[in-house]
Amino acid sequence: MTTTRFAPSPTGYIHVGNLRTALFNFLIARKAGGTFILRLDDTDPERSKPEYADAIMEDLEWLGLTWDRVERQSERLDRYHAAANTLRDMGRFYEAFETPTELDLKRKKQLNMGKPPVYDRSALALTDDEKTALRTERGNGVWRFKLDHERIEWDDGILGDISIDAASVSDPVLIRADGQFLYTLASVCDDVDFGITHVVRGSDHVTNTATQIQIIKALDGIVPSFAHHSLLTGREGEALSKRLGTLSLRDLRAGGVEPMALLSLMARLGSSQPIELRASMDEIIAGFDLSTFGAAPTKFDENDLFPLTANVNAAKPYALVADDIRALGVPDDLAPRFWDVARENITTLADLEGWWALCRDGAEPLVADEDAEMVATAMTLLPPPPYDDTTWKTWTDAVKEATGRKGKGLFMPLRKAVTGMERGPDMSSLMPLLQKVRAKG
Ligand code: GLU
């Protein structure tokens, strides 16, 4: 059965980059009628925080990315111990004692000689006595997985055929000197134990995948299908990594971005298929095809979310926004009508406030010099509120008669005088909502 997972570390809020990973894995599982697991990669006790785990779940729920179960790496340490022992018994695991400074020096030397900065495996040559001495002097070492120096190959779901020379990769550290299991080992154990069939993640994980394939095989596990999506860049192709902090799902949500807008964009961005606003998750699932995604970096522009958000809002039935509208203080008898008029003229729901302020208090009139006289006459012809559906027609007919103005020369100055804006809702529909027209004085 198709089983996928989204595996964030609860060390911060998730952002659009993470969302891409979460969404692809979710969609693969849902499309196949399989299982989607939320795995919290919380092996780092200092940086992992329960409040971030809660926030991640809240953000996924907001988007409707429901998971079938949650797994926590911090609850699986026994399993990682057992796997480490297996690797040790097989002779694929060795302790190394270099300090970070020593490793750095080695890397620099290699780079100076034009060689790739790959760990030189000096620790493999240590005798038991030397190790004991080092342990006494420096404390426990780190544990590295001994890669088989062969080519590691897989058919990547996005990148196509990949072949990596294991000799060009350092033996990965799987256990830190303080005993903490690192992501690579934990992830491999989990993927094997949970029967993960497909792993989609960012292309920054390609080298990890190479080493993980060898570890999975060493542990007798079944290697899942791997796919690596490109990383997001900004509008101009600049790295997005520094700005991701401001592109957290919570910030987008607080900025009024609608879930369907975000999902519709992210399910297609970077693919050969067009971005289309979808009305439901089922449509997003049906329209998803991993094979249409390309390897090139994907440009993300948060401004693209706003036209989509405006369309989502314009299509919302009143019932979905009734609470927001009541919260603004719109009287119940006006509220459905207010929504009908406002919905085509907002981007986010926060824009409703401005439209309600206009209806309630009127707007600062916008009157050009050449229209001042005509507007003054018009205001004498406008009765006091309340207005109804016929007000605009009756009034503009009377102004036309009195001033000889017609067409745009009639309607635009009046719109500007009443609303303070050149554009906006249909005036016949807006008039009945106006509690006040300031130009009337
Ligand atoms: N916790 C890892 C990350 O966020 C998971 C990577 C993976 O999908 O294996 O990068």
Image (cartoon, grey):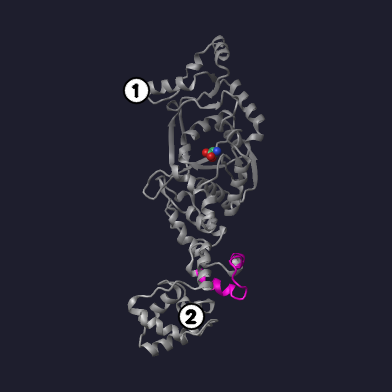
In the image, the residue with mark 2 has its CB under 8 Å from the nearest atom of ligand 1: no
Q: Percent from the top left, x then y, of residue 159? A: 43, 42
* Tag of residue 358: none
Secondary structure category for the residue under label 2:
helix
Q: Percent from the top left, x then y, of residue 126? A: 52, 13
Q: Check residue 324 for magenta coloring.
A: yes
Q: Residue at x 36, y 85 (%)?
A: 406
Secondary structure category for the residue under label 1:
helix
Locate the N terminus by quadrant.
Answer: top right
Left or right: where 356 falls relative to 51:
left
Mark 2 lies on residue: 428
In front here: 416 or 373? 373
Q: Residue at x 39, y 26 (%)?
A: 116
Q: Check residue 333 for magenta coloring.
A: yes
Residue type at the position of mark 1: Asn
Distance of mark 1 from mark 2, alpha carbons?
A: 76 Å
Q: Which contiguous range is marked in magenta?
A: 322-343
Q: Does residue 212 appear anywhere in the picture?
A: yes
Q: Residues within 10 Å of mark 2 (few under 14, many from 20)?
A: some
Q: Does residue 35 appear anywhere in the picture?
A: no
